Amino acid sequence: MKILTDTEKLALDKYEVNEGQPHILINQELCQACSTKNCLFACPASLYSEQDGEIIVEWAGCLECGTCLAVCSNNALTWQYPEGGFGIIYRYG
Amino acid sequence: MEKFDVIIVGGGPAGLSAAISAARAGMKTVVIERGDFPGTKNVMGGVLYTKATEEIVPEFWKEAPLERPVIEQRYGILSGDELVSATYRDPAWAEPPYNAHTVLRVKFDRWLAEQAVKEGVMIIPETVVEDLLYHNDKVVGVRTGRPEGDLGAEVVILAEGANNFIAQKAGLAPKLTPDRVAVAVKEIIALPQEKIEDRFCLEPGQGATIELFGDSTAGMLGTAFVYTNKDSLSLGLGVMLSQLTASKLTPNDLLERLKAHPYIKRLIQGGETKEYLAHLLPEGGYKAIPKLYRQGVMVVGDTAMFVNGLHREGSNLAMISGKIAGEVAAQAIKSGDTSEQAMSVYATRVSDTFVVQDLYNYRNINGFFENNPHFLKVYPEIVADSMRMFFTADGVPKRERLKQIMNNAFAKRSKGSILKDLFGAWRALK
């Protein structure tokens, strides 16, 4: 099988995106002081990136696993489940 | 505010089992689920154990959407391109009373929810529970994300999964830390039935499972797995977050690395990925079990850390803990006593089952592997070397070869260290 990138894989999944209602909020000040930035690697969907010194999350592709929250060493994330019915909708499980 | 006897937070195997047992005892029961219907947010590797499931729905295999009965289990170690494995196979497992089936959770959980509805359970989907409601110290209901979404209950059962947000807010569980949870990623890879049966040596309809240690997770504490579904494979891996973050590898890197391994490559060849999934696995074991109750509330399944990673058991622990909590809730409500002491019956009863006993037995395992990271790095290599040397026919007399095997092992890990490791592993397992 050919190698698939994270982005290609997420394109296979079904989502109901709650436009304009991010369920992950980032406290950039705490991220500035973070030496590990575990979120950049640990997220299974690779949704976190660093742009101009800020941590960005493309929350719409979130698989709602909670990994980023568990690895965030500075408690910089405010993470809630998307509103009922929104977010990832697995078709196989 | 609408009132119920029992409110269950989360429609997975734990929550639905709790709901079924509470409803059977005559309780007005509701399950609050954040997905479109129970199942759409739920992920596991895919092995469902017969014994525990039958305690919830007798003879479920006659109707439930199952993939394949597991007749073969293979445990293996990857070292580079090499594989050393042990297999147990018994065709009798293709017939009742079975041992386990592979399942896809979206279908299975939906079906289990239908069974709950038949028992009189109400399911409220597309609703997130945000917090518990209290009267003094007693839990008296839940606050949902819906307008005027407060619901009252005599007893609330938390079956919210690995992410234990409500249990944290209730002061029952601490925040998840990377040494207590693993992240699992999985792909559903479509493959024609005949191909699956040929590649895994199965009669039509039979299933097999493979678990791989060692290089399958780049030597980190974790497991990779391949499970056969009807016309797809579930291929994935789980790895402790503490080790993953130290490695700076991404879960998808690990998964693609696994897919490229010569052994796995042949199994999945020609397949088409249909879905990519991720989920947390509570792997903290016995020492990380949260407080299981307080006045008017109990904690079950993944939220209670009821996962036996070594045996890849979880859904069965979830269902049994859920069933007991449902029964205890009903009993408490009937006797008009939902005090902390009444809820403690749940902790006592669940501790008398394999659920807590197995975790207690393995209470030192995680610490052992965390403190001995070489274990899953050095030993796969030693084992693979030894087997290669053992099977190589190159004219070296066998007595001499045995010496070479021992010397090779001791060169990679000293005699004293190997003894220490064996003793440590024995102590951690006993």
Image (cartoon, coloured by chain):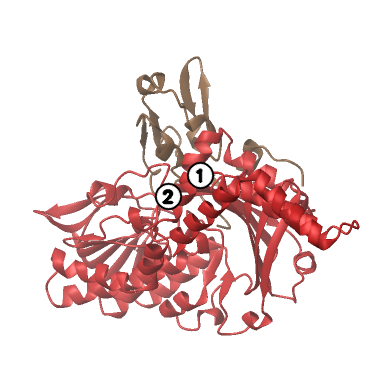
Residue B37 at x, y percent in the picture? 45, 59
Q: Name the residue under label 2.
A: B367
Q: What residue type is labelled 2?
A: Gly
How many labels were placed on the picture? 2
| Residue at 24% across, 73% down | B328
Observer-nearest of A87 and B43: B43
Q: Which amino acid does label 1 sit on?
A: Leu
Residue B106 in sight: yes
Residue B138 at x, y percent in the picture? 13, 58
Letter of the chain shown red in the rendering? B
Residue B30 at x, y percent in the picture? 30, 66
Observer-nearest of B350 and B28: B350
Instruction: Look at the picture and state if B204 lies above or below B10.
Output: below
| Residue at 29% across, 55% down | B290
Position of residue B95 in the picture relative to residue B320 (left or right)? right
Instruction: Look at the picture and state if B110 lies above or below B370.
Output: below
Instruction: Look at the picture and state if B234 lies above or below B169.
Output: below
Question: Residue A63 bears which disc, if any?
Answer: 1
Q: Chain A is drawn in which colour?
A: brown
Residue B363 at x, y percent in the picture? 39, 58
| Residue at 50% across, 14% down | A52
Determine the chain carrying the residue at label 2: B
Instruction: Look at the picture and state if B164 lies above or below B194.
Output: above
